[in-house]
Image (cartoon, grey):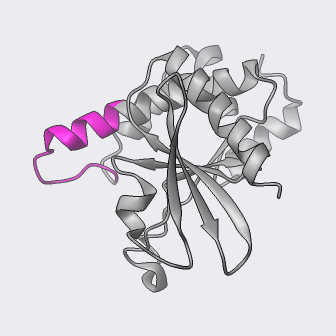
Amino acid sequence: MICCERNNVYNIFQRCKIDIILLKRISQVLNHNFFEDLAKDEDLIIEDEETEEEKMNQKAVYQFFDVVPDVLNEMGLDAQIMFTRLEDHKDFDKCPTPDFALVPYFITLSIGNTMKERIGENPILPISVITNEDGCEIEVCQNKLYNSVDVNIKLDYKTREEWYKTLIFAFETYQRVGRR
């Protein structure tokens, strides 16, 4: 029912990570929301009382995982989403990296704040904010050290249509400035 051979189904249980689209398909087939289970995982729950901002960020992330893979599929693009935060790694504590990345593109997403707010002014990583006529806002970070470009989207609550327009704008911008 998930379009997977029997031996591959067993392999899913051996993995330490799972593709979001696959987890969504499994959730649909089993009629169980595993994303909700992950959101309620005690290891992920913060002991302190959550602020309104934290609650809004969680709502935005839940909605992001519910909407964006489908939008990417509609666009004919790879819908793999990768976690990129490095805070748990002792050498990268408080590293101002984005939270998620769209694989295999140089398009990232940061929860709650912009990349510019995380990184600040940095001559090696200058960041510019671009807004289109639809009001979609993205950031373009040019890494002067490696001569690369990253397009970042602030991950906040957006309607399906807003995500669609924002993603189109991000991919168009990346095609224009990222391939120079």
What residue is at 26 percent from the left and 34 percent from the top?
56
* Image quarter of residue 173: top right
Q: Is residue 160 left or right of residue 29?
A: left
Question: Residue 59, how many percent across, how many down?
Answer: 33, 30
From what the image shows, is residue 108 above or below residue 120?
Answer: above
* Front residue of 54 and 156: 156
Residue 32 appears in the rendering: no
**Residue 55 lies in the magenta-colored region:** yes
Residue at the farthest left position: 49
* Residue 128 sits inside the magenta stretch: no
Magenta stretch in the rendered image: 44-59
Question: Residue 131 appears at what percent x and percent y?
Answer: 50, 36
Relative to 118, is 163 above or below?
Answer: above
Using the image as rendered, state which of residue 59 and residue 142 is in the foreground.
142
Q: Quadrant of residue 142?
A: bottom right
Question: Is any part of residue 30 visible from this angle?
Answer: yes
Nearest the camera: 46 or 16? 46
